[in-house]
Amino acid sequence: MLLGTWNLENLYRPGGPSGPKDKAAYEAKLAALAAVVTALDPDVLGVQEVGEPEALADLLETVGGTWHAALSAHPDGRGIRVGVISRTPLEVLADTRAYPARLRPVQADDSGATSDGSGRGFLAVQTVTPAGPLRVAVAHLKSKLLSYPGDRFFPRDEGERARYGAYALYRRAAEATALRALADDLLAGDGRERDVAVLGDLNDEVQAATTQILLGPTGSELDTRGFETPDQGDAARLWDVAPLIPAERRYSRINSGRRELIDHVLTSHRLVHRLTSAGTGTDAGPGSREELRLPSVGLDPAARRNEPGSDHAPVWVRID
C-alpha cells in the first residue's frame, strides 16, 4: 500500500480571485497534477489547498479510475481545505477546527483579535485496506508566510515583522496541539495494534517545536538505537518517516532557494514497523539520485496563480 500527502497549491476552478485566469490555465494545472497522481498511484492520499469541491472532482476525473473522496467542511478565509482521496471507501470520523478544551484562544494580530480554533479544519477518516482498517488525520497548519493588515505581505518595520511572526507561531503551535489531540482519539491508547497516520502540510520542518508536539512521548525515533526497543510510549507515539527518505530527496518545497521538508507523514507503532520505503515526489526507484523538479517560491502567494502543477512535492510511504 502507498500512503501519502500532497499540497495541491490552490486547486480552484478558473475565474475566481484565487483560481487560474482561464480554462486553458486550469486544464494545464489539472493535467500536471493528474500526471503526478497517476505516477504515484497512491492507495490513500491526504490533500491540502482544495478550493471548490468540484475542482477536486475535476482532478479525479482527469486522473481516471475509481476514487473515493472526503473533504473538510471547514475551509479557511481563502476557501481552501484539506481532504482525502482513496481507492477504498471512506468513513468520516471527525471534521473539526476546535482547540482542546483547556487551550485558550491565542492572539492573532495587533488589534488583539484572537484565534479560537484552527484556520483550516482537521479531517479524520477511516478506510479498510487490504492490510486492514486504517485511520488517517489530515491537516494544513498555519503558514510561516506572514500577512499584515491591508492585505500586505511586507511589514512596515522590523517590529511589525517580529510581532506577526510570533502570532503565526502561536497559532501553529495551538493547531499542532489540537491535531495531537485528534491523533490521541484515533490511537485510542492502542497504537501498537491500530494503524493510524497523520498526514499534512505542517508548515515547518522535522525538528521544529510545532512538529515535535505531534510525536507524543519522546524516545524510539527512527534512525536511533532505541527504535527497536519497545517501551511504554509506543502505544501513544507517532513516528515521522522523514529519516527513511533518501537524504538527497528529503524536501517537499523550495522556499527562496532553500530546500524544506514541511509536508509530513507520521505513523503509529503498528504502521512504522511495516514501512518498506519512503520518498518525496514520485517513486524514482531504488538508488535513484534524481532531484525533484520544484519551483522556488517567494513571499507573494499569488505569483503562481496561473502556473500548472504544485509548488510542493508529495511525501509518501510504502507499507507491507
Image (cartoon, rainbow, N blue to C red):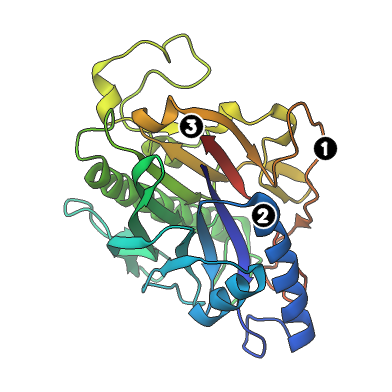
Disc 2 crowd rating (10 Å Cα; few below 14, some 14-19, many 20+) is many
Type of amino acid at the residue the image marks with label 2: His
Image height of 269 relative to 61, above or below: above
Task: Give the secondary structure at mark 3.
Answer: loop
Q: How far is the residue under mark 3 from the one under mark 1? A: 25 Å
Query: Nearer the N terminus, badge 3 or badge 1?
Result: 1
Residue 165 place in picture, x, y as percent: 52, 54
Q: How far is the residue under mark 3 from the one under mark 2? A: 26 Å
Residue placed under numbered mark 1 in the picture: 290
Type of amino acid at the residue the image marks with label 3: Asp
- Of badges 2 and 1, nearer the viewer stands 1
Q: Which of 80 and 116 is in front in this view?
A: 80
Image height of 28 relative to 47, above or below: below
Q: How far is the residue under mark 2 from the one under mark 1? A: 16 Å
Type of amino acid at the residue the image marks with label 1: Glu
Disc 3 crowd rating (10 Å Cα; few below 14, some 14-19, many 20+) is few
Residue placed under numbered mark 2 in the picture: 312
Query: Nearer the N terminus, badge 3 or badge 2?
Result: 2
Q: Which residue is drawn at 72% across and 80% down?
A: 26
Residue 211 place in picture, x, y as percent: 45, 40
Q: Residue at x 57, y 67 (%)?
A: 147
Q: Which residue is drawn at 33% across and 66% down?
A: 114
Residue 156 place in picture, x, y as percent: 63, 67
Q: In this view, does 253 lie to the left or right of 42?
A: right
